[in-house]
């Protein structure tokens, strides 16, 4: 007798289907049970409005969470960067698998890199975080660029470049990798140029808090370093009282001396979308061994950034 399938709730976008499919295989391995994908349409998928206009965080996440809480699915996979920082009542993030490339990348015409885009180049991105850092880079490097707000899925965004409407678009490497289009990248942006969104490149596997067996099985897919890093990044975001559409970048990484991991470094940036002002700071501390220690690292950096005027640069606060 085959065991009953676990139901994985997923958005229908190509990216969501790709990452759900990959997690489904991994979950099937650790549980010994088949995993069945259950497609759920979210408000974010059907709305044509810009994400910033919809407002608030987690528009893509709410419908999946409702399906979990109604018992229609057993677990869900989220891009961690789209997940609101507030813990949701009745749900747990049972696993955060090892993060893949957290960087942002450029897909440009004529195989161009950011630094050799033509004068006045139009660069598509809907993220205030990317606009702020791209514009700041352009200002300090004597470049003339125009950031153009776009949204839509990966195909749509790259389509603007192929059609000639835009010179380039900026996307997350992880997303392109998951949908099999990483070959189209023309420039991998250094995190010194553009710091990624908190949690970028990492996935969260979420289920209901009462599902002890599943929580125990999913724990095998958890990567403690990734969890510590993204916890610190998201703690920074939360302490700045910013949402997922705020111009906040953050990245935690491990500092090693040879093979020996010494410390965790957390870098953060906040800026105005025109790039005229950036607050960019970093802090280091012992590698956090508890959730609370990772949270503390994020709060510590937030305090320093707020002291440098970060709050005034974030525009409208998320609720
Ligand atoms: N905002 C949408 C979104 N959510 C997660 C990813 C990419 C994959 C990831 O960061 O895990 C993307 C697309 C993008 O920013 O290019």
Image (cartoon, rainbow, N blue to C red):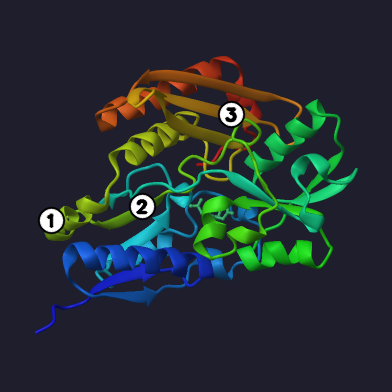
Q: Is residue 52 left or right of residue 37?
A: right
Mark 3 Cα within 10 Å, few/some/many (few <14, many 20+)? Answer: many
Image x and y of residue 168, in percent: 76, 53
The residue pinned by badge 1 equals: 212
Mark 1 Cα within 10 Å, few/some/many (few <14, many 20+)? Answer: few
Mark 2 Cα within 10 Å, few/some/many (few <14, many 20+)? Answer: many
Q: Is mark 3 within 8 Å of ligand 1?
A: no
| 247, 213: nearer the viewer | 213
The residue most toward the right is 119
Against 143, residue 75 (above or below) is: below
Disc sitting over residue 269 in the figure: 3
Marked residue nearer the N-terminal end (2 or 3): 2
Marked residue nearer the N-terminal end (1 or 2): 2
Image x and y of residue 188, in percent: 64, 45
**Which residue is depicted at the point 81% across and 57% down?**
110
* Quarter of the N terminus within the rendering: bottom left
Against 141, residue 211 (above or below) is: below
The residue pinned by badge 2 equals: 204
> Which structural element holds mark 2?
strand
- Distance, label 3 to label 1, CA atoms, is 38 Å
Disc sitting over residue 49 in the figure: none
Image x and y of residue 310, in percent: 59, 24
Mark yes or no: residue 111 visible.
yes
**Which residue is depicted at the point 51% across and 16% down?**
304
- Distance, label 2 to label 3, CA atoms, is 23 Å
Marked residue nearer the N-terminal end (3 or 1): 1
Quadrant in which ligand 1 is drawn: bottom right
């Amino acid at each position: 007798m085959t065991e009953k399938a676990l139901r994985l709730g997923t958005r229908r976008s190509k990216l969501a289907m790709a990452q759900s499919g990959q997690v489904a295989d991994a979950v099937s391995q650790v549980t010994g049970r088949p995993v069945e994908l259950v497609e759920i349409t979210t408000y974010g998928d059907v709305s044509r409005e810009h994400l910033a206009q919809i407002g608030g965080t987690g528009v893509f996440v709410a419908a999946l969470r409702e399906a979990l809480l109604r018992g229609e699915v057993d677990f869900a996979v989220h891009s961690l960067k789209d997940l609101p920082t507030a813990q949701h009542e009745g749900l747990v993030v049972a696993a955060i698998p090892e993060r893949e490339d957290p960087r942002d990348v450029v897909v440009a015409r004529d195989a161009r890199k950011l630094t050799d885009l033509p004068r006045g180049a139009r660069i598509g991105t809907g993220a205030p975080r990317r606009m702020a850092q791209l514009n700041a880079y352009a200002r300090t490097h004597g470049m003339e660029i125009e950031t153009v707000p776009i949204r839509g899925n990966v195909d749509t965004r790259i389509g603007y470049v192929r059609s000639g409407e835009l010179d380039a678009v900026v996307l997350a490497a992880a997303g392109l990798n998951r949908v099999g289009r990483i070959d189209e990248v023309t420039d991998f942006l250094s995190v010194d140029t553009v710091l990624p969104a908190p949690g970028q490149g990492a996935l969260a596997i979420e289920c209901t808090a009462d599902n002890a067996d599943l929580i125990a099985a999913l724990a095998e897919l958890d990567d403690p370093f990734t969890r510590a890093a993204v916890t610190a990044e998201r703690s920074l975001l939360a302490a700045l009282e910013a949402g997922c559409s705020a111009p906040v970048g953050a990245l935690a990484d491990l500092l090693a001396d040879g093979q020996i991991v010494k410390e965790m470094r957390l870098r953060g940036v906040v800026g105005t979308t025109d790039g005229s002002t950036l607050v960019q700071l970093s802090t280091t501390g012992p590698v956090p061994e508890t959730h609370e220690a990772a949270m503390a690292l994020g709060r510590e950096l937030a305090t320093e950034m707020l002291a440098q005027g970060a709050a005034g640069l974030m525009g409208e606060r998320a609720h």
